[in-house]
């Protein structure tokens, strides 16, 4: 039975993430969303939500959805969007693209700010940094495009995301806590951890090389279903050898006029 034939599924309007995020899956989104739609489930979970590169591009949802990230800045942004949307827009509406403002915000410790200010800082840095980097950010400028932070373009996306988060449970747990908590025979996990050898790209100590082995053990004992995306490395194939692999070549533009193909894998049970 297809998802559209089951009453427990609902159509949703896909939207785009509010900001770039390293490993955002824009190139693989259509394929992964198709696999999600083809897998029966009543509970949908993402232990590594990031900016929601897959979550917000889906066009069907079950009744229960749970998203999670160990990065507190990500979770705070989504919580503020869902619970304090009007106030958040007031904080953002006079912001412009400025290297000076970028450098000022980079130097501020998030813990010294209110939750609204933290969310605004995080969103601004993600929008204006080069390549959607989360740590070691640099101010991004392109000679052939306008400023990266344009509230007139961003406001409609933020409104769509705010509406989409209605009814979604947002967690701030490690993946070792999150996956067992929501694992049932009716759960589907989409799992998008840092790429192998890029574990520190999202912040120091958020995910370690040894965590791939921990993740594998959790998946071996899983009651539900999962779809896992990673870079195609011999180490990845060895760690997750108990599961099914599909290899995919993805083309990424790395510089003006330069495009490279990278091997990725979609792993599932």
Image (cartoon, grey):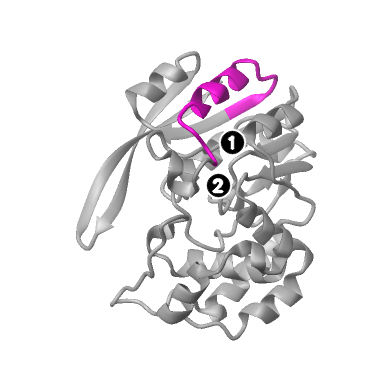
Farthest residue to the top: give it. Answer: 242
Side (left or right) of 207 relative to 100: right
The residue under the point 31% across, 50% down is 252
Residue found at x 58% / y 42% = 48
| Residue 61 visible from this viewpoint | no
| Residue bearing mark 1 | 190
Task: Describe the element under mark 1 as helix, strand or loop.
Answer: strand
- Which residue has dot 2 on it? 54
216 vs 104, nearest the viewer: 104
Q: Is residue 152 magenta?
A: no
Residue at 46% in and 74% down: 102
Q: Residue furthest bottom?
A: 94
How far across and down, in percent of the image, does residue 30 sit?
48, 45
Element type at mark 2: loop
1 and 2 marks in contact (CB < 8 Å): yes
Q: Is residue 188 left or right of residue 230?
A: right
How many discs mark residues in the rendered view?
Answer: 2
For label 2, the crowd category at 10 Å Cα-Cα, with few meaning under 14, some 14 to 19 and many 20 or more, is: many
Region rendered in magenta: 206-226
Residue 216: x %, y % from top left: 54, 21
Q: Say which quadrant the C terminus sits in.
A: top right
Q: CA distance from mark 1 to mark 2?
A: 9 Å
């Amino acid at each position: 039975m297809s998802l559209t034939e089951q009453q427990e599924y609902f159509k949703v309007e896909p939207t785009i993430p509010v900001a770039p995020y390293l490993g955002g899956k824009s190139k693989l989104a259509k394929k992964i969303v198709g696999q999600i739609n083809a897998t029966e489930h009543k509970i949908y979970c993402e232990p590594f939500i990031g900016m929601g590169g897959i979550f917000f591009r889906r066009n069907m949802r079950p009744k229960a959805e749970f998203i999670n990230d160990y990065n507190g800045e990500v979770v705070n942004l989504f919580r503020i969007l869902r619970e304090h949307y009007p106030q958040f827009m007031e904080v953002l509406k006079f912001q412009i693209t400025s290297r000076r403002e970028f450098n000022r915000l980079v130097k501020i410790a998030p813990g010294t700010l209110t939750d609204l200010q933290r969310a605004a800082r995080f969103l601004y840095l993600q929008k204006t940094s080069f390549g959607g980097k989360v740590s070691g950010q640099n101010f991004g400028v392109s000679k052939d495009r306008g400023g990266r932070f344009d509230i007139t373009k961003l406001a409609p996306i933020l409104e769509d995301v705010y509406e989409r988060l209605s009814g979604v449970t947002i967690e701030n747990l490690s993946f070792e806590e999150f996956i067992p908590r929501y694992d049932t025979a009716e759960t589907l996990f989409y799992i998008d951890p840092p790429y192998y050898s890029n574990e520190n790209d999202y912040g120091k100590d958020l995910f370690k090389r040894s965590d791939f082995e921990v993740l594998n053990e959790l998946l071996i004992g899983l009651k539900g279903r999962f779809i896992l995306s990673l870079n195609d490395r011999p180490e990845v194939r060895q760690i997750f050898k108990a599961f099914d692999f599909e290899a995919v070549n993805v083309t990424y533009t790395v510089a003006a006029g330069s495009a490279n193909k990278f091997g990725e894998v979609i792993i599932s049970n």
